[in-house]
Amino acid sequence: MLKNLVIKNYRAFETFKLDHTARVNLIVGTNNSGKSSLLEAIYLVASEDASSSLISILHERGEFALEPMDARYNIVRQIGNYQIAHIFHGHNLTTDQVITVQAGVNKNPSLKIFTRQKEPQQRLPLVENEEIDTGSRSLHLVFEREGRNEETLRITVDGLLSDRLSRPNPRRVITGDQSAKFVTTNYLAYDALAVLWDDITLTPSEDKVVEALQILEPKVERISFTSRQTSNSGILLKLKGEKEPIPLGSMGDGMRRVLAITASLVSVGKGTLLIDEIDTGLYYGVLTDMWRLILETSVKQNAQVFATTHSWDCVRAFQQALSSTTAPDLGCLIRLEKNDGKIEAISYSPHELDIAVKQGIEVR
């Protein structure tokens, strides 16, 4: 479990230090305070395959390169390559830029991401007096961890990660063999949820997912996936008293959100789950029960959770869920503040959070 974190040169963080974390952590802060960037940094250092995780992050953020198609109408098209400069603090892609994410955990050593110029491969002339094109040095993005082989991605002459070289595989982020999963504000596609469900079906974890869905709809008895691979018709629910199954898509956005969160949590094993804007699509009245389920499940699996929110209702529900547990130190509220351009973390223990909520002190 990650106990502390130091980030240097990643996105909004020139230098950032997080001294304390708990099993379940709720991150708050104003817009542009670095909440999503903090989740990304944790995701990168906790993942077994940092290069694939970075590609997924760039894809999710929509950091694609564009090229003009018709100047008369200001029309552009997405060419697939990913903009890489923005992951570095200051948005500059130079060979002296180094990102470091140092985690206080033994399983995943600290991560370094930097660029390196690679000399072209030389070959002997095939015929006498043949002129050999020496080529030019190519730029690579390097992922380095102590005791592991380097991972590299090639950067184009335009400073982009090529779509052909590094197209993301959406299944990589959510398969059971990864030690970290990231649930963003976007919907998980049918195939992504189906891959998760392959590891869950007919196991005790299936009951935990059904229990989570019952927070929103108490009549849910079972869930099933069909060959019709659309978000609205491919996932079916069996409701008590109903003869025919009900498509998940007809039950509202909250049901799909809870399914994505819970399925990811029960399949991450002893790893790390990151959830951006955890309360998206959820009615405030169900948030406390959702937090209780997350606290209970994370303990059983020995998993660690980091989530973000802007909602006071979500903060209050988190506090209420913590206060009802036998071990309230399971959770921690982390507030990100920007002072003179530097982002700092302020941690609230469950006791401090309890006082802040009861007295109406603003902690978001």
Image: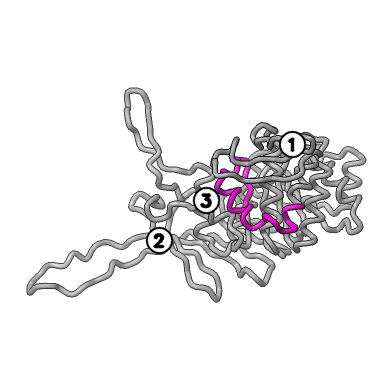
Label 2 element class: strand
Label 3 element class: helix
In this rendering, the answer to whether 75 lies above or below 351 is above
> Is 234 inside the magenta-drawn segment?
no
Query: Residue 18: x percent and y percent?
Result: 71, 58
Q: Closer to the camera, 232 or 121?
A: 232
> Is 203 inside the magenta-drawn segment?
yes
- Residue 140: assigned label: 2
User: Gap in Å between the C-alphas at discs 2 and 3?
Assistant: 23 Å
Position of residue 102 in the picture relative to residue 346 (left or right)? left
- Tell me, yes or no, whether the two marked residues, 2 and 1, touch with CB atoms within 8 Å: no
Label 1 element class: loop
User: Which numbered disc flags the more N-terminal residue, 2 or 1?
Assistant: 2
Query: Residue 92: x percent and y percent?
Result: 46, 50
Position of residue 125 in the picture relative to residue 161 (left or right)? left
User: Can you identify the residue that label 1 sits on?
Assistant: 282
Callout 3 amino acid:
Pro
User: Gap in Å between the C-alphas at discs 2 and 1?
Assistant: 42 Å
In this rendering, the answer to whether 353 lies above or below 313 is below
Mark 2 or 3, which is nearer the eye?
3
Q: Closer to the camera, 349 or 319?
A: 319
Callout 2 amino acid:
His
Mark 3 is surrounded, within 10 Å at the Cα level, by few (under 14), some (14 to 19) or many (20 or more) other residues, namely some
User: Can you identify the residue that label 3 sits on?
Assistant: 170
Identify the residue shown where x is 37% and y is 52%: 164
Callout 1 amino acid:
Leu
